[in-house]
Amino acid sequence: MLPDSTHRFIEIGVVGRPHGIRGKIRVRLFNPESSLINRLPEIYLQKEKTLTRFVIRNVATTSRFCLLTLDDVTSRDEALEWVGATLCIEREALPELEEDEFYVADLIGIEAWDDACCLGRIVASRAAGDIEVVTIVGQGQELDVPLVEEYVVAVDIAGGRLVLKNSDRLPRCKASGKD
């Protein structure tokens, strides 16, 4: 996760292997159904905490990934340097949200509660098919929670709290050593 990611940048994908010899990069988008990438003039790639801006020259999408042609990435060797990088965009490029909507990236760092018990803080998110899953670290363990009605009671971004129910039915992950 980027420093200051909840304020300025949002992660939207991960760079995979190059495509061809002219520097096209293959990207797995976290939301492959979104067409946002087709409307962006630029993106940022993060590798080892360094953020680099690129102008998009062309986008080609498939059902599983997209191919980006970027200024300043003109060979397979240059594209190889970005394998594993996180694709980020400026927050302002995102569409306006409806009243009861939120971006999953905004959950990172907030507390998760079940009844009167704080389970820990949300440290990560990932897509699991069509469902977003957040990872909560606290009480010496990690807990993966699908963001579905069966477990989520309320999301209060401003108050810094995700309220859960039925967390006792979720499988516990490995001990994290983090609290």
Image (cartoon, rainbow, N blue to C red):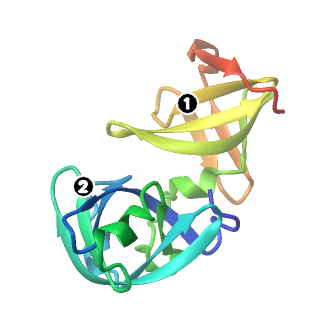
* Residue 117 position within the rendered picture, expressed as x and y whole percent measured from the top left: 80, 27
Measure the alpha-carbon separation of dots 1 and 2. Answer: 26 Å
Q: Is residue 171 above or below residue 53?
A: above
Q: Residue at x 64, y 26 (%)?
A: 143
Q: Quadrant of the N terminus?
A: bottom right
Q: Is residue 88 above or below residue 167?
A: below
* Residue 107 position within the rendered picture, expressed as x and y whole percent measured from the top left: 62, 51
Q: Which image quarter: residue 46?
A: bottom right
Q: Is residue 8 left or right of residue 131?
A: right
Crowding around mark 1 (Cα neighbors within 10 Å: few <14, some 14 to 19, many 20+) is many
* Residue 11 position within the rendered picture, expressed as x and y whole percent measured from the top left: 50, 61
> As shown in the figure, which amino acid type bears the numbered disc 1?
Val
Q: Is residue 23 left or right of residue 179?
A: left
Q: Which residue is mark 2?
A: 65
Q: Which image quarter: residue 123?
A: top right
Of 107 and 70, which appears nearest the observer? 70
* Residue 10 position within the rendered picture, expressed as x and y whole percent measured from the top left: 53, 66
Secondary structure of residue under mark 1: strand
In the drawing, what numbered circle is on residue 157? none
Q: Which image quarter: residue 69?
A: bottom left
Q: Residue at x 57, y 71 (%)?
A: 9
> As shown in the figure, which amino acid type bears the numbered disc 2?
Phe
Q: Is residue 119 left or right of residue 33?
A: right
Q: Which residue is mark 1?
A: 145
